[in-house]
Image (cartoon, grey):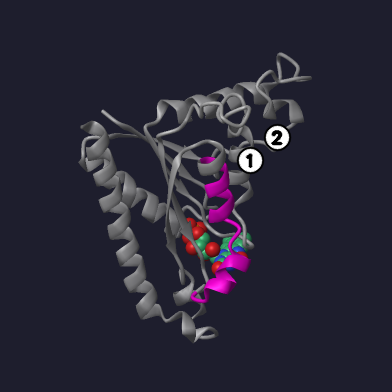
Amino acid sequence: MPTLLRIDSSVSPESSVSRRLTEAFARGWEEAGGAVVVRDLDADRLPHLPCRGLHFPHRPGVPADLPEAALQDAVIEEVFDADALVIGAPMYNHSMPSTLKAWLDYLHVPGRTAPALPGDPAPLAGRTAVIISTRGAAYDDPALEQEADHVVPPLRVLLGTAMGMEVEAITLDRTLADMLAEVMPELDPALAARLFAEAAERAFARGRELAAALAG
Ligand SMILES: Cc1cc2nc3c(=O)[nH]c(=O)nc-3n(C[C@H](O)[C@H](O)[C@H](O)COP(=O)(O)O)c2cc1C
């Protein structure tokens, strides 16, 4: 049975759009017979990386009893135990939530989760990571998107280029259309509702398809 690691990082559990989409993905995954493990980075926040030694495989200068070293082992094992990842990545101030960034800081260890040297094998190669990115505003102009989005590109570089995973992204804009309709009518609540429904359907279908493919 394939295992999905579902990661959420929105700070708004009640109203979160990214959580609704990771939930849809996980439902599709379960419908195809897969198991889901959840890591809620907002409910269980990782501390900021306490020292540079945790970024290196031999942990230079890290005291043996440093509690963050055990946390890092748990983060890394969870990813190795998963067949695929779905990552809720809301845009906060044009970047990712700091809780998600902390998770990346724990996960990326050259020589352990990524090749130590160019040409070395990537231990996590072959896993698929699906990023679900939600943004309150609209980024219809590609030039604006390139300048303003610092959520998906770094995740692609870290998980894909550095760790060798197959990275996909489902990005949903206009999530604040209802709240801001009076001041930003261009967000267009009717369009926003349609885009949400499409993204939820896409997430569900991709979860189901991926789990079915991995189940063989
Ligand atoms: C602290 C904070 C900062 C935000 N910054 C941005 C931003 O820079 N650009 C944007 O389009 N939306 C921004 N938003 C709106 C969120 O991206 C939007 O509400 C999104 O749906 C958040 O995901 P969630 O619904 O899963 O929490 C911000 C929201 C918060 C709470």
Q: Which residues are magenta?
A: 140-159
In space, the residues marked 2 and 1 are separated at their CA atoms by 7 Å
Question: Which quadrant of the structure image shows residue 46?
Answer: top right
Task: Mark 1: give few (<14), some (14-19) or many (20+) Cα within 10 Å.
Answer: some
Say which amino acid is labelled 2: Leu
On screen, 175 above or below 127?
Answer: below
Q: Which residue is mark 2?
A: 49
61 w.r.t. 104: above or below: above
Q: Residue at x 39, y 74 (%)?
A: 192
Q: Marks 2 and 1: CB-CB under 8 Å?
A: yes
Q: Quadrant of ligand 1?
A: bottom right
Whether label 1 lies within 8 Å of ligand 1 gets the answer no
- Whether residue 212 is visible to the viewer of this picture, yes or no, is yes
Mark 2 surroundings within 10 Å by alpha-carbon count, few (fewer than 14), some (14 through 19), many (20 or more): some
Residue 51 versus residue 60 in the image, above or below: below
Residue 98 appears at what percent x and percent y? 64, 48
Q: Is residue 116 above or below residue 133?
A: above
Taking the spot 24% from the left edge, 38% from the top edge, the residue there is 213
Residue at the image position 55 percent from the left and 85 percent from the top: 183
* Quarter assignment of residue 120: top right
Majority secondary structure of magenta residues: helix
Q: Answer whether residue 150 is magenta in the image.
A: yes
Q: Mark number for residue 102?
A: 1
Type of residue at label 1? Answer: Ala
Q: Secondary structure at mark 1?
A: helix
Residue 211 at x, y percent in the picture: 27, 39
**Percent of width and height locating residue 119:** 56, 30
Residue occupying image coordinates x 58% and y 33%: 107
